[in-house]
Image (cartoon, helix red, strand yellow):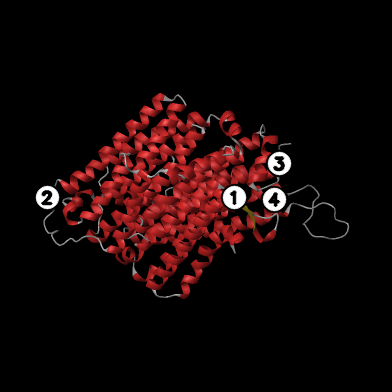
Amino acid sequence: MLLGHYNYWIVIVLMMIGFYIVIAHGNLIKKIVGLSIFQTSVFIFYISMAKIDGGTAPILAEGIEQYSNPLPHVLILTAIVVGIATTALGLALAVRIKEAYGSIEEEEIQNKDNLDC
Amino acid sequence: MLIHLPVLQVIIPLLAAPLCLFLTKPRLVWLFALIVSGLAFLISGLLLQQVMTSGTIIYDLGGWDAPWGIEYRIDRLNAFLLLIISSISTIVLIAADTSIRKEIPADHHVLFYILYLLSLAGMLGIVATGDAFNVFVFLEISSLSAYALIALGKDRRALWASYQYLIMGTIGATFILIGIGLMYQMTGTLNMEDLSKRLPEVSQTRTVFTAFAFLIVGICLKLAMFPLHLWLPNAYAYAPSIVTAFFAATATKVAIYLLIRFTITVFGLSFSFTHFPLQLLFVVLGLVGIFVASTVAIYQTNVKHLFAYSSIAQIGYMIVGFSMTTMAGMTATLLHLFNHALMKSALFLALGAVMYRIGTTKLTHFQGLGRQMPLTLAAIVIGGLSLIGVPLTVGFVSKWYLVMAAIENGWWPVAALILLGSLLAVVYVWRIVEMAYFKPALAGTETIKEAPLSFLIPIWTLILANIYFGIDTRLSVQVAQAASMSLFGVTP
């Protein structure tokens, strides 16, 4: 029972790892890495949900009775695109922050902001 | 043509955004964006009229029947929201050309309008669609363009604010994605109408509980409900003025729409409020939000920060109205949605005008500004009065309905606290008035002139709307009541 759902356990573990990195790390690039892991866990979750035991790819052919649900695959393609856009934007912002502040550490940036006020 | 209005509403700004690249002259692009936004405004007006007379419009995208295809479902609530978003977007855009000349480097002007239109398309899409996954896609379209728009701010802190918003916003959106996935797992459908029929059968399962929890937390992050509001103040304060005026009036409203749509239409009132202690949670957080945010607003030294915190407080009022789960409470929330959009867009545009003339919105620089920029400051004062809820302004109307709804529920302490919260608004608005009218002008500021007409026209249009809808409440109240009736399934 527990092992049978091992992909869901992986989802949860990845989700928590990603979430923890986002919260705990002060480095902007590491935060984005964490965010990506967090999002990836959701992709695996959607794909796991579509899988049927013994089901094949959804292709119309003779002798194939059971198909995996293709809809979550399609949905997750969209979500992957969104994830890439987010990562790209986040990294671009990190580059600009490095140029403007000379650092990508949360603490240093916060200190410089406090000096400005 | 008329039957395609629901999709044209979203498609026109979405397609217009990349077209901007072909018009290389910033002035031309501005005019184009203004026309596109104006068209969206026109369409939303037509839609609202159609919905009010003949009921819900259902549009199957590409001719595929729901629940297989994506369905756009425009009822009174969406139509009302569409009108708020597109009208504010159009009015704010009038001032964009003048404002961004001072605040954004010239080679980014075309990109600014592209992002603006994308963000508009995303918000209109979230509201128009009747498909849960489509909501996520449009949410990300509007959010990603929002992060980039905020990063366009002149101050380097805009970058940091944008980054923080990106992290928080993406966590929120991913939570919503998880919620939608869990719902799909249990019901096999993504169509909201279909979901609302199938969810009750499985409502006792833990999966549905988890789905609901993820959705609510994700949406609350997006709507900056206290204590999930940390991204908002800096994002609003350092974004270009036009962006702030647009987002303050629309972005959080769209998230409130999602909250209402998912809790009431999709999950149903009985699930949302009896299985979950959502009512207690929202009343308390709403009220705490009002007091904490208003108090913090009093101590701000930057007027943009001040009004950003005031926005969080105003969201608290909407949450309190929503948590009453009565028709009167919902009407008050929807009214406040509309009224707050009018106030905040006017106030932030006026701050944009101040920014244009003196290059900062620090409170100390407001000294004596009442004599140098009389029309702009008068607008800020009237907007501030509306925020407090003085009679003859829209703020009074929504506070009145909110207090009435609380009393109708027998929530006397809540009604008293709502009124007390307004007193805090008096304090922070007074700080600006005192600075602008009762202090001598700073030395060397004799040359400051009144804001240009391209600012004054949209600002005063919004301010006059503030007064007009404060006196003649028929239109706004009628639509808000009709929308909350349709939400609670009562036929008028």
Chain identity of mark 4: B
Identify the residue position indicated by label 3 in the image: A5
**Element at badge 2?**
loop
**Residues behind callouts 2 and 3 on a single chain:** no
Position of B378 with respect to A86 (left or right) is: left
**Residues behind callouts 4 and 3 on a single chain:** no
User: Which of labels 1 and 3 is toward the front?
Assistant: 1
Quarter-wise, where is residue B455 in the image? Answer: bottom left
Check the image and report above or below for B129 versus A24.
below
**Element at badge 1?**
helix
User: Which of labels 2 and 1 is toward the front?
Assistant: 1
Residue type, mark 2 in image: Pro
Callout 1 touching callout 4 (CB < 8 Å): no
Identify the residue position indicated by label 1 in the image: B54
| Mark nearer the N terminus (1 vs 4) | 1
**Element at badge 4?**
loop
Of residues B419 and B52, which is closer to you in this image? B52
Of residues B97 and A71, which is closer to you in this image? B97
Which label belongs to residue B141?
none
Residue type, mark 1 in image: Ser
Question: What x and y, as percent, mark residue B130?
Answer: 61, 50
Question: What x and y, as percent, mark residue B317?
Answer: 41, 37
Q: Residues within 10 Å of mark 2 (few under 14, many from 20)?
A: some
Q: CA distance from mark 4 to mark 2?
A: 65 Å
| Mark nearer the N terminus (4 vs 2) | 4
Q: CA distance from mark 4 to mark 3?
A: 29 Å
Residue at figure coordinates x 55%, y 56% from the top left: A83
